[in-house]
């Protein structure tokens, strides 16, 4: 998903001036956040991924992950004591993209993880979040109200907000039938002919020359020995080896 692949003719409305500002990537140098909100299917993930790809081309380090998977991974990392190392990786990247932020309810552990990540990255590195909910709804989905309010206040106070509205962008990617009414499909696999002579003859027939003609088998010419050569030549006299006698019969 790249910026140049976005279809401007889509029935999606948003602040064009704000989008142009985000495409300049000045928010990365200023360590500001980006919050992209809107209903399902309007292209929030597409635009967030496109911004992340633009950052990569500018040689910024970027980490993209869905929020629920990230929190599950951090929770599992506590079992092998690798949680601190995983958090340090998230804090070290220039741009952190959290997709589907607060889509489901967060327990106390997940709320604490979000609080630490947001607070440590506040005014130090850019964070991009996408969500179907408004920030006021995030408070009701977090288990600890105090940590939630502190994290969301920091995240929102340093964020550019881009609100999308309109029809689902995914409908434009729905497969269609071409004008001729034919569907593009892969050719069926070639089946091996079966005959009384077995598959070897079938393969040799398919590998024939031009025009489908069968190649003429090579003719092997054998010469019959003549009468003169049929007569056995007299055997050469036996040569005696040194120290060995020759017995004549």
Image: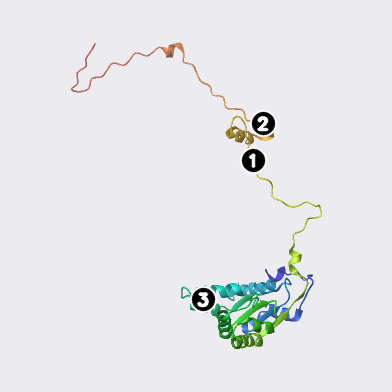
Ranked by sequence position, the earlier of labels 2 and 1 is 1
- For label 2, the crowd category at 10 Å Cα-Cα, with few meaning under 14, some 14 to 19 and many 20 or more, is few
Residue beneath disc 2: 213
Helix or strand or loop: what does disc 2 sit on? loop
Camera-near label (2 vs 3) is 3
> Badges 1 and 3: C-beta atoms under 8 Å apart?
no
> For residue 29, which quarter of the picture?
bottom right
Indicate whether 73 appears above or below 117: above
> For residue 166, which quarter of the picture?
bottom right
The residue drawn where x is 68% and y is 82% is 137
Residue beneath disc 3: 86
The residue drawn where x is 71% and y is 68% is 5
- For label 3, the crowd category at 10 Å Cα-Cα, with few meaning under 14, some 14 to 19 and many 20 or more, is some
Query: Nearest the camera: 134 or 140?
Result: 140
Ranked by sequence position, the earlier of labels 2 and 3 is 3
> Badges 2 and 3: C-beta atoms under 8 Å apart?
no
Residue beneath disc 1: 191
Query: Nearest the camera: 164 or 240?
Result: 164
Camera-near label (2 vs 1) is 1
Helix or strand or loop: what does disc 3 sit on? helix
Residue 227 in picture, x, y percent from top left: 45, 11
């Amino acid at each position: 998903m790249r910026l140049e692949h976005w279809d401007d003719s889509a029935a999606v409305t948003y602040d064009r001036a704000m989008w142009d500002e985000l495409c300049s990537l000045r928010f990365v140098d200023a360590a500001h956040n980006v919050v992209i909100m809107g209903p399902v299917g309007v292209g929030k993930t597409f635009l967030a991924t496109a911004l992340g790809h633009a950052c990569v081309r500018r040689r910024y380090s970027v980490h993209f992950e869905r929020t629920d998977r990230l929190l599950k991974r951090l929770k599992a990392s506590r079992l092998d004591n690798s949680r601190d190392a995983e958090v340090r990786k998230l804090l070290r990247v220039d741009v952190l993209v959290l997709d589907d932020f607060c889509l489901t309810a967060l327990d106390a552990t997940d709320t604490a993880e979000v609080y630490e990540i947001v607070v440590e990255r506040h005014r130090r590195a850019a964070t991009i979040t996408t969500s179907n909910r408004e920030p006021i709804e995030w408070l009701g989905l977090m288990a600890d109200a105090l940590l939630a309010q502190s994290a969301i206040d920091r995240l929102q106070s340093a964020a550019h907000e881009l609100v999308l509205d309109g029809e689902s962008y995914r409908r434009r990617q729905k497969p269609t039938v071409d004008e001729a009414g034919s569907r593009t499909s892969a050719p069926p696999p070639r089946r091996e002919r079966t005959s009384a002579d077995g598959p070897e003859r079938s393969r040799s027939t398919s590998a024939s020359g031009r025009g489908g003609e069968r190649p003429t088998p090579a003719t092997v010419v054998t010469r019959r020995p003549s009468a003169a050569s049929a007569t056995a030549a007299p055997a050469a006299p036996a040569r005696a080896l040194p120290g060995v006698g020759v017995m004549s019969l």
